[in-house]
Amino acid sequence: AALAAQAKQQLAETQRAENDDNQAVGREKAMMATQQTQAKDEMAQSQQLLTKTAGIEKTVAQLTPIVSDLRAAYLHEQRTAIQKGLVSQDQKREDARDTLNKYIRQRERIQQLPKSKKHAAQLKKISAELKAAQKT
């Protein structure tokens, strides 16, 4: 009877151990299935990210020459505007110089004429115009 009780106890322990082992195997399989699912999901996300990245790189590659052309056009426009400004300034200086030279020649011609009140008044007027032209 003691032997039967001991055998019964060992059988119960063996069955419990087998049951625990089966549960452990089930948990292990469930964990592996979960990890495989996570790995598949992560792989799909990585693939989506790579696809998006490739799309962005393609878009950047397509836009790069357009941006470069726009920048070159902008810089050209800017340089042209600067050159026009410089030409305009040069033209203004030349006009001012021509005006000053005109008054100086008129003054010299009047100074060579015989002195009279009329000539003195003209000389005074031209001198005033010359001073005004020098201020501009």
Image: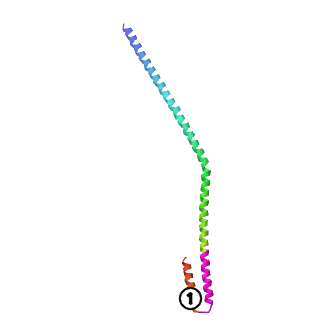
Q: Quadrant of the N terminus?
A: top left
The structure's colour scheme is rainbow
The residue positioned 60% from the left and 59% from the top of the image is 75
Query: Where residue 32 appears, x then y in whole percent?
Result: 49, 27
Extreme residue toward the top, this view: 1
The residue positioned 63% from the left and 90% from the top of the image is 112
> Which amino acid type is shown beneath numbered disc 1?
Ala
Q: Quadrant of residue 93?
A: bottom right
Query: Where residue 18 appears, x then y in whole percent?
Result: 44, 18
Query: Where residue 38 appears, x then y in whole percent?
Result: 50, 32
Q: Nearer the viewer, residue 103 or 48?
A: 103
Q: Is residue 105 magenta?
A: yes
Extreme residue toward the front, this view: 118
Q: Nearer the viewer, residue 24 or 35?
A: 35
Query: Where residue 54 appears, x then y in whole percent?
Result: 58, 42
Vertical comparison of 54 with 77: above or below: above
Q: Is residue 113 magenta?
A: yes
Provide the major secondary structure of the magenta segment.
helix
Vertical comparison of 83 with 10: above or below: below
Mark 1 Cα-neighbour bin, 10 Å: few <14, some 14–19, many ≥20: few
User: In the rendered structure, which segment of residues is drawn in magenta?
Assistant: 94-115
The residue positioned 50% from the left and 27% from the top of the image is 33
Q: Quadrant of residue 11?
A: top left
Q: Quadrant of the C terminus?
A: bottom right
Q: Quadrant of residue 4?
A: top left
Name the side, left or right, on which 38 lies relative to 86: left
Name the side, left or right, on which 5 lies relative to 80: left
> Disc 1 on helix, strand or loop?
helix
Q: Say how many tags the image has.
A: 1
Question: Which residue was labeled with disc 1?
Answer: 121
Vertical comparison of 130 with 29: above or below: below
The residue positioned 61% from the left and 57% from the top of the image is 73
